[in-house]
Every structure is written in structure tokens, then in C-alpha cells.
Image: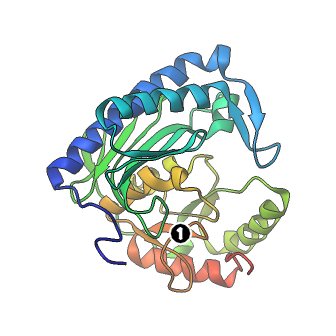
């Protein structure tokens, strides 16, 4: 992929300003969804399966984010989980998850996030280049931000991923798809992986999982089938903190598989996942 394929290359100052806008939008949406959970947070629809839920606040949150972004960056495209894609002319696309961890949100589990990122080029891995992003947990107030080349921060303080332990001592996060057949395949992989690691966590928000790896709360994270909005902001936070993002069998991280961990552990975990049959069937 050439630089032109990856779209425009904002300066560090421009990327930092975009990160500020991502944080502004994420915080505004976070306040909305937190205040609205009790009275308007119930399930209103499902998507790919009965487990894949949507709430009224998912929709309201995305609409608010779009308004904030449109006011400041009308030339940019927006890709949102609920509203699809609106076109732009700048070569930059905002990739938005209005509530990442909707099931946690519905059940009152304080592990969900608003994820707002902007990427250059095609808005999907491995073709994109994340430029700026924010992951905001409305319940705890914790806010991760990152800009390309500008590092990653948690509540304004720099974060750097620690050196990873060997796989046998690693606390590994993961997530599952929504269809029964996909879940069954992923359960088989976890069953093979679990004896090889310290333990496995399923927190329920890929955006938070990636930020947790960046902050040392998880040693590693992997998941098959993540959508661009699930991963964009957390991807950049992790990468800017020194986390390696890879796929399996030498491939780059993509929707097929994303493995995030410090470099040596990422390779070790990717090899173990390959042996466990984690790659999707052809």
C-alpha cells in the first residue's frame, strides 16, 4: 500500500487537534448515554441475531456524535455502526461506535464505551491509517486518547504498554460473535487456549479491551470478526502505547483476526491461536 492509497497525512498538530475533537464528541455522547440509560436504555431492535442488540441510546448517541463532527469537519466522511456511511471529500473518515458494549450497557455493567476515531484511506483494516481517536467510558469517566505519532494517554497522562509476560503467564482478553455457529467455533478456540495462559477475560467491549492492553490491565487481546467501529480508536491507542497488532500466520491485523499484545507476546499468542484453529474457514 502506498502513501497515496492511505489517504492524506495530517501533521502531528493536525492529528492532535483531531484527537481533541474525537474526545469532545465522545464525552458529549457519553454524558447522553449515561443520563439516559435508566429510562431509555432498553433494547429496541436486534441485528445479526437476538444477541446483537440495539438501544434507543445507541441511535441517539451516534446522531449526537455526527452533529458534533459535522459542525467542525463537514468535509470528512463518517462511518457509524448504526447510521452507515456518509460521504466526504477530505480523504478522512470518522469511524464511530456510539456504545461499544451495548449488552453491558443494557444490564448496567459499567464496562461500555463511546469510541470515536478518524482514519485516512479506506476505513477498514488493514488498509486504513488511524490518525486520532478517543475511547471514553461514561460510567468510570476514564478517557483514552491518541494521535498518530503523538502517543497515547489515559485521562491526559501518557500510557506505555509494559513488556509482556510469556504466554503461560498472560491474562488474555477476547470477545465473541453474535451467531450461534460463530460462538461455537470461538468456544472451541478458547477451550484449547485456556490451559496455555494464566486466564481469559471476556469484558464485552473491544474498545476497552484494546485500551486495557495499552494500560497493562490485560496482557493481550484477540478477537475474530471485529467491525471497523469496534476497533478504530482502541487500535490507535494500543499502537501508540507500543502494542503490536497482528493477524495470524504472518498476516496483518484485520477483520479476520486481530491480536494485540507487546511484540513478543503477540507473536506467541498468534502462533497458539493458529494451532487452535482460530482462523475462519475458507
Question: In the rendered view, would you say 202 is above or below 282?
Answer: above
The secondary structure type at the circle numbered 1 is loop
Question: Quick check: 186 left or right of 111?
Answer: right
Q: Residue drawn 47% across and 35% down?
A: 137
Horizontal placement of 252 versus 159: left or right?
A: right
In the rendered image, residue 173, in percent from the top left (x then y), is placed at: 58, 58
Location of residue 47 (image quadrant): top right
Q: Is residue 169 above or below residue 42?
A: below
Which quadrant of the figure contains the C terminus? Answer: bottom right
Name above or below for residue 1 compared with residue 28.
below
The answer to whether any part of residue 141 appears in the image is: no
Question: From this viewpoint, is residue 28 visible?
Answer: yes
Nearer to me, 111 or 119: 119
Q: Residues within 10 Å of mark 1 (few under 14, many from 20)?
A: many
Q: Position of residue 98 (x, y in %)?
A: 53, 36
State the image coordinates of residue 14 (x, y, percent, origin top left): 19, 48
Q: Residue at x 42, y 50 (%)?
A: 233
Question: Residue drawn 76% across and 33% down?
Answer: 45
Q: Label 1, on which residue?
A: 254
Image location of residue 187, percent across then percent down: 77, 64
> Can you tell which quarter of the image residue 20 is in?
top left
247 left or right of 190 in image: left
Q: Which one is in front, 116 or 161?
A: 116
Amino acid at each position: 500500500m502506498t502513501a497515496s492509497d492511505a489517504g492524506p497525512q495530517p501533521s502531528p498538530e493536525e492529528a492532535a487537534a483531531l484527537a481533541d475533537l474525537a474526545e469532545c464528541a465522545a464525552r458529549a455522547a457519553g454524558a447522553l448515554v449515561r443520563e439516559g440509560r435508566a429510562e431509555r436504555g432498553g433494547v429496541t431492535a436486534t441485528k445479526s441475531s437476538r444477541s446483537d442488540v440495539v438501544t434507543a441510546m445507541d441511535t441517539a448517541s451516534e446522531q449526537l456524535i455526527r452533529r458534533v463532527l459535522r459542525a467542525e469537519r463537514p468535509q470528512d466522511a463518517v462511518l457509524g455502526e448504526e447510521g452507515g456511511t456518509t460521504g466526504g471529500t477530505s480523504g478522512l473518515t470518522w469511524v464511530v461506535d456510539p456504545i461499544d458494549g451495548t449488552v453491558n450497557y443494557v444490564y448496567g455493567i459499567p464496562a461500555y464505551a463511546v469510541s470515536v476515531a478518524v482514519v485516512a484511506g479506506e476505513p477498514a483494516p488493514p488498509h486504513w491509517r488511524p490518525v486520532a481517536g478517543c475511547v471514553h467510558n461514561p460510567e468510570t469517566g476514564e478517557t483514552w486518547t491518541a494521535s498518530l505519532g503523538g502517543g497515547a494517554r489515559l485521562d491526559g497522562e501518557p500510557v506505555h504498554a509494559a513488556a509482556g509476560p510469556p504466554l503461560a503467564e498472560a491474562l488474555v482478553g477476547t470477545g465473541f460473535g453474535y451467531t450461534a455457529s460463530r460462538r461455537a467455533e470461538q468456544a472451541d478456540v478458547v477451550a484449547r487456549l485456556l490451559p496455555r495462559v494464566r486466564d481469559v477475560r471476556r469484558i464485552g467491549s473491544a474498545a476497552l479491551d484494546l485500551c486495557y492492553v495499552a494500560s497493562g490491565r490485560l496482557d493481550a487481546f484477540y478477537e475474530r470478526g471485529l467491525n471497523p467501529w469496534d476497533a478504530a480508536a482502541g487500535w490507535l491507542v494500543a499502537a501508540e502505547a507500543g502494542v503490536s497488532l497482528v493477524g495470524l500466520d504472518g498476516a496483518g491485523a484485520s477483520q479476520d483476526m486481530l491480536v494485540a499484545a507487546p511484540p513478543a507476546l503477540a507473536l506467541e499468542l498468534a502462533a497458539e491461536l493458529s494451532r487452535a484453529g482460530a482462523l475462519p474457514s475458507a
